[in-house]
Amino acid sequence: MNPDPHRIDPAGLITAPAGFRAGALACGLKASGNLDLALLLADASCPSAALFTRNRVAAAPVILGRETLPEGAGRLRAVLINAGNANACTGERGLADARAMRAGAAALADCPPEEVLVLSTGVIGVPLDMAKVEAGLAGLPARIGPAGGRDLALAMMTTDTRPKQAALALDLPSGARIQLAGAAKGSGMIHPDMATMLALVTTDAQLEPTRLAACLRSAADRSFNRISVDGDTSTNDALAILASGASGHAIDPRGAAGAADLAAFEAGLTALCQHLARAIVRDGEGASRLAVVRVTGAASAAEARQVANAIATSPLVKTALAGADPNWGRIVAAAGRAGVPIDPARMALDAASGFVEAGDPGGAWLRLFEAGTPSAFGEAEAAAIFAAPELTLRLGLGLGAAEDEVWTCDLTADYVRINADYRT
Amino acid sequence: MNPDPHRIDPAGLITAPAGFRAGALACGLKASGNLDLALLLADASCPSAALFTRNRVAAAPVILGRETLPEGAGRLRAVLINAGNANACTGERGLADARAMRAGAAALADCPPEEVLVLSTGVIGVPLDMAKVEAGLAGLPARIGPAGGRDLALAMMTTDTRPKQAALALDLPSGARIQLAGAAKGSGMIHPDMATMLALVTTDAQLEPTRLAACLRSAADRSFNRISVDGDTSTNDALAILASGASGHAIDPRGAAGAADLAAFEAGLTALCQHLARAIVRDGEGASRLAVVRVTGAASAAEARQVANAIATSPLVKTALAGADPNWGRIVAAAGRAGVPIDPARMALDAASGFVEAGDPGGAWLRLFEAGTPSAFGEAEAAAIFAAPELTLRLGLGLGAAEDEVWTCDLTADYVRINADYRT
């Protein structure tokens, strides 16, 4: 599904869909004094779905979130987010703190605690300063207002250099217009095993929770999971969607135009999630360059993903990207150790500047390697592609018809500087 | 097997065992003008074994090496090594060049080409300048001499900052004394998927090729494979051993004292390989710190290795090591995403300065994390351990009795600098 037909507003707020309000304040969890506690509030309890980290060391709010939304679906009235402290590896005390946050937010929202999702991001292994959180909760109602969506996106940030948000008006095949919006934070490099990723999506469409969960899984697989090694996630990663239904338009595939509407909704949700996921990669810690690693001609999509991941996670490939060095040998060598039975004699590697979408017949491709040997490409032309702020690598395996892609960024000395001394 | 009883000479030459000579010269493959072509010459054809990269994109000399030593065992008279060019991704021409190198060395050694192993390391995807290699081959005989062992270790280097060699005199249970020696190069970071690793071992013991191959596999698994993600190897990685038999002592487990001698030989070979493997990690590109990541209490050794690898390869753990930051949360989070069903409530994480060997009852351990929560350790004490040039991390899973370990180094801004612009 090509996301191009969607007119995404890159500055759209999470409160753009009808039925949602938000607010944030600085309660002191961030030493910087920046916004660090945010609340998303729905006008009424609404169908919701969420995906959580698969890390075996799950943070307290994730453990609680799985209780709140069994099977990843249920109903939510509010989402409370704090940054500056992940409430991870904090044991029983951490779980009690997460429950206290949930109860506090439920009191503000005037709903049962079971309708509140808590999300945390920040340093691991330090107990939350609950006095600060409680004081912050008391001040939140006064902050809920029209600018709240912008504040929420700011309050989620840790090492992010800019907020990540977007909104989208979607005209469904049945004629109805619904809104979708999202806010995300990714504290850095592209793989969630390296950083907490939080993302929140709202819509004023009306969908059943389990259908919403299915749409979310599908969209995540083509967006946030493209910036992830399968199953590799931090202690706190979470992606949640709330559907207020305030547009008055129900999306139900059992109805006449329902199936087409559902497909359009899923495509719009996917485009929105892709926009946010790419924003996370572009804001990678220390990153100066985004690369799409697309593997085509694979025997299966899983093998394509496996090869793409090996390339996208290779420190040698990522440092070459930092140096704007068209070092195709490292790309080919990374593919060779992916654990997939590839044959160099059947391979072909192309590069183009810019984010060339899959299925886009254009793209000024330069062939770097083919049939086991380097191609006779112009060094200056290759250098220009690798110096672009975004580039696309396309590796054909010549083994089948399946393809998949991963989005990565370069590994710079700044990344090391940011992470060598994060905690102390 | 504790390698301590072995008195390893850290400056011992590859020519220490009887029956071997060596030499090297600069033929111009390295732009620096440093030594780049070396020959190891046995007095006679001798039982040999080798292990090669499992990368699907194997370099021409590796493809040829597998022909020379089917099943990793056979007989060799000489090993020709070049640095400055990996002869990888060079197609048919590369294979022809590797064959020409093999033929040239065979002429010097006065042996069939099938008794010559060729090893290459350096840049990928550039055809070898064979005129330089041929001229170098012509000059090599004059360089074969007593100092040749030292020159060979120097000629193997690429981004290595120092040569890596060692020798060992081994008193076998039967009373015989044999010699073992090795030289290695590892151009950088700890995982062979990131750098070519070449290692050459000689001995004057006499062993059958297949037995030698079995000993080599066992030793590699506890040394060079500890600095490797399973199966993750570069296009050129190779480890070879030649047994001249010039000591006059045959090691044959079918004999009376043979089984004990074979065990002692394997232990000595393992200790030598461990010494060389650790030297590679210590000389990691830009590395300032070596860390042993030992996982104990696992359900199986494979799962222990899997968890240790996840920790040892985590950029967040490696950058924390660079910053001397006791950020145990990243270690625990990396373990959580290893794909092994661990339970944080059963885990315990300790750290000690220095390379604390497995089975060493000593070690000044500091507990950092236990049963899902941080321990009340002294921040200054933890900082001192993480500031040491070598430290040992011990993560107990509380799931079983198996253990394994991986040796890693820190990820520094210097690593990025070295690799961002290697090729151009």
Image (spheres, coloured by chain):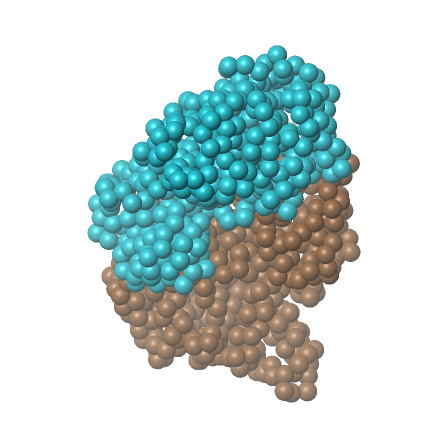
Chain colours: A cyan, B brown
Q: In which quarter of the image is residue B156?
A: bottom left
Disc count in the image?
0
Q: Residue at 55% across / 38% down in the picture?
A: A209
Give how far across and how far down residue B325 sits, in percent.
Answer: 63, 36
- Residue at position x 24%, y 61% in the image: B131
Q: In which quarter of the image is residue A28?
A: top right
Q: Where is residue A124 in the image (x, y as percent from the top left)?
A: 65, 35
- Report the residue that reaches farthest toward the bottom: B255
Q: Looking at the image, can residue A101 be seen?
A: no
Residue under the image location 36 percent in, 66 percent down: B61
Would you say A258 lies left or right of B183 here?
Answer: left
**Quick check: A21 above or below A367?**
above
Of all residues, the one furthest to the front in this rendering is A256
Front in this rendered view, residue A411 or A306 = A306
Residue A5, compared with residue B244, is above or below; it is: above
Q: In the rendered image, is residue A26 in sight?
A: yes
Left or right for B371, reference B69: right
Question: Where does the image place residue A371, in percent across and percent down from the top left?
Answer: 27, 60
Q: Is A255 rendered above or below residue B154?
A: above
Considering the image in quadrants, where does the C terminus of chain B appear? top left
| Towards the viewer: B367 or B238 | B367
Residue B396 x, y percent position in the rendering: 72, 52
The quarter in which the N terminus of chain B is drawn is bottom right
Q: Could you tell me which residue is drawn at 50 percent across and 35 percent down?
A: A207
